Amino acid sequence: MTYYSKDQKMSWQYRLINDIFSIEEDNNCSISTLDFPNMSEIKKKHCPYSLHKFYAPTIENVSDVQNKLLWLASPDTFNDPYDCYLTFDSDEFERYYTIKALKKTAIFTKEQKNIIYRTSNKIYTNSFSYQFGKIVENANKKSIKSFEKKLWQKRSQVRQYIQSRISDKYRIACFSSYFWDTKNYEQLMWAHYAHSHKGFCVEYDISPLFDERVEDKDLLPYYSILKKDGFLHSFEQRRLMINGFFPVQYSSKQVEVPKTLCYAISKGSCDKKQICDINIKAFRAIITKQLPWQYEQEWRLVVDSYVSERVNHKIPFPFAKKIIVGIKASDELKRILSDTAKMLDIPINVFL
């Protein structure tokens, strides 16, 4: 296999994801524990060392910064409902499923079969959902109505399956790599992620992750939360971060699972190649957002849920470089953050 393929038609992070998941024989790729060839060098070429994270003004957020910890959130909690959303064309899937079923069932008349074969998504009145709805509406057979119910169930099964490949499998921390020449976009970041300027922002310098002269134990000490299996060794922490950092790709299109894969999911018959393809689609969805969000210049740290769970979804993150306080922050928050900056021996500024 040629790792990190050179297909220039695809973004580097997409190409890397393809290579990562394709080398896993069991098709259950763990991004956090994978020992992928030259991963550090690949990421070093692309990863900005300075990353910003915006925080709401909560005691827990301040405490995490003080304790050099980073919260890994579930994708289900993100404010954009289409963020980390892996989709599929339900109309195309249902049409494909039904045409496959026509060869094995006699519940449809020849005329009904012809209608189903002729459906197309180009015009709504000729779409499968519209035409099949008419067939069901005019049918007297209970078997056809029963088939319609089965289609709904299969659609729901596919939707739940593909979303579970994200919500159950990964935890995420979001950053911005911004260096803006205007404050218009920065105002939006403060409004969206720092409680309308009442919160704060931390600038992190993650360059030590890629400095081979810094040893694992000196960078990230052994971390334990005093529960069974609730620990991370220094080398594990460094590897999960290097492996997990990816820039967000902004696109006008959502990542979509094709109808053939949806059919295999609905039948519970996915082979290894198909599972690999689904995993690739799921991870792409995690690092793909719609074009209106591109001003965020977002980078994400993606960690496998089972690894994150070991430490209650908080990992050591001793990279704070500077604290910036929101212009509407309370005097109490300013005082606490000032003490935090002194404790961490880093500068503090007020956003103006």
Image: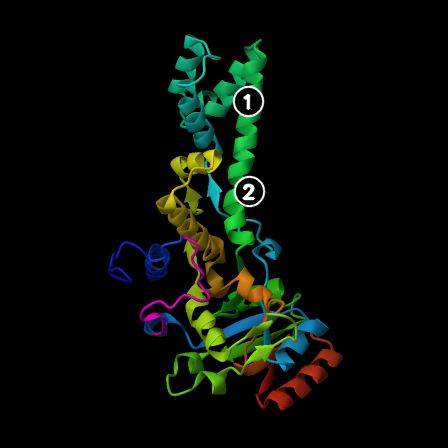
Q: Amino acid at mark 2?
A: Gln
- In magenta stretch: residue 32: yes
Across and down, in percent, residue 98 comes to 45, 23
Is residue 268 or residue 64 the one in the foreground? 268
From this view, report whether residue 140 is shown above or below residue 172. Answer: above
Tell me the crowding category of disc 2: few under 14, some 14 to 19, or many 20 or more residues within 10 angstroms, Cα based: few
Residue at numbered disc 1: 148
* Secondary structure, magenta segment, majority class: loop
Q: Indicate which disc residue 160 carries.
A: 2
Where's the N terminus, which quadrant? bottom left
Let me know if residue 290 appears in the view. no
From this view, report whether residue 338 is shown above or below residue 90. Answer: below
Across and down, in percent, residue 219 comes to 48, 84
- What residue is rendered at 39% in x and 79% in y? 210
Is residue 56 or residue 61 the one in the foreground? 61
Is residue 107 or residue 66 the one in the foreground? 107
> Magenta span covers which residues?
27-40
Q: Amino acid at mark 1?
A: Glu
How far apart in space, not on screen, are marks 2 and 1 (Cα)? 19 Å
**In the drawing, does residue 322 fall left or right of residue 12?**
right
